[in-house]
Amino acid sequence: DQQVKQNSPSLSVQEGRISILNCDYTNSMFDYFLWYKKYPAEGPTFLISISSIKDKNEDGRFTVFLNKSAKHLSLHIVPSQPGDSAVYFCAASANFGNEKLTFGTGTRLTIIP
Amino acid sequence: SAVISQKPSRDICQRGTSLTIQCQVDSQVTMMFWYRQQPGQSLTLIATANQGSEATYESGFVIDKFPISRPNLTFSTLTVSNMSPEDSSIYLCSVRSGQSSYEQYFGPGTRLTVT
């Protein structure tokens, strides 16, 4: 039972354009969400998070949007840069982050120069 | 954020043997986590290790197969016992940042191949 889903296994975006990565979840107890970036041979790197009391959180080029009614979140990267090429995982937690993280299957983002 | 190192970074092991993976953190942390990422799959939590208590295992993972030690607030080990090719994965440890209780920071991982 995959409680966190990333339905796009891969995405290609031109450098300078906006990258939009999507994530859906099924467990209504999830109330804290995180995005991680992973390069080959490295551990995941924390990018940005959002609590269910918000619908948007912004940090530089990265913005996460949360639609609780649709159980959907998205990560926007603008402008996209070649160094953004990586696998992106969304993760979810209950009890405002105090419970374990449940990860999605990942989306491989490729930025085309 | 915490700096986390893991040893070994990779290994190739024979089936039936065991491998112990070490995780070292540069600051004291209460909770450490061990994850597995099988080829082409997502990260799956194996267990949570608190210093001074028994590790808490997730469904599908048992202590006999994945014994964990947590002798102090900066160190933990995960042993993969009696290995089979299905154990070929990347094993990662993570910690919660002391500045935020919600975000987890990961080590570089240990890539294990069982032949």
Image: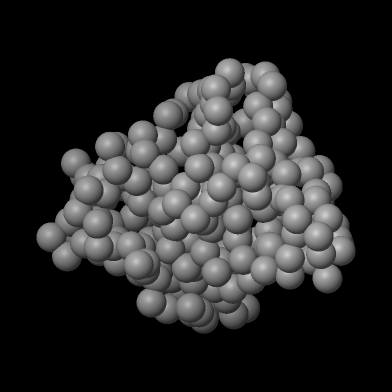
Task: Residue B102: name its quadrant.
Answer: top left
Q: Is residue B32 above or below residue A16?
A: above
* Horizontal and vertical percent position of residue B104: 51, 40
Q: Nearer the viewer, residue B102 or B16?
A: B16
Q: Nearer the viewer, residue A21 or A32?
A: A32
Q: Is residue A34 above or below residue A76?
A: above
Q: Nearer the viewer, residue B12 or A4?
A: B12
* Horizontal and vertical percent position of residue B24: 73, 31
Count of labels shown? 0
Q: Residue at x 44, y 57 (%)?
A: A103
Q: Residue at x 24, y 57 (%)?
A: A27
Horizontal relation, residue B7 to residue B46: left or right: right
Res B2 visible: yes
* Horizontal and vertical percent position of residue B84: 73, 65
Q: Is residue A44 above or below residue A86?
A: above
* Horizontal and vertical percent position of residue B4: 69, 36
Res A80 visible: no
Q: Residue at x 62, y 31 (%)?
A: B2
Horizontal relation, residue B55 to residue A7: left or right: right
Quadrant of the image containing the C terminus of chain A: bottom right
Q: Residue at x 28, y 62 (%)?
A: A25
Horizontal relation, residue A76 to residue B110: left or right: left
Quadrant of the image containing the N terminus of chain A: bottom left
Q: How is the image coloured?
A: one colour
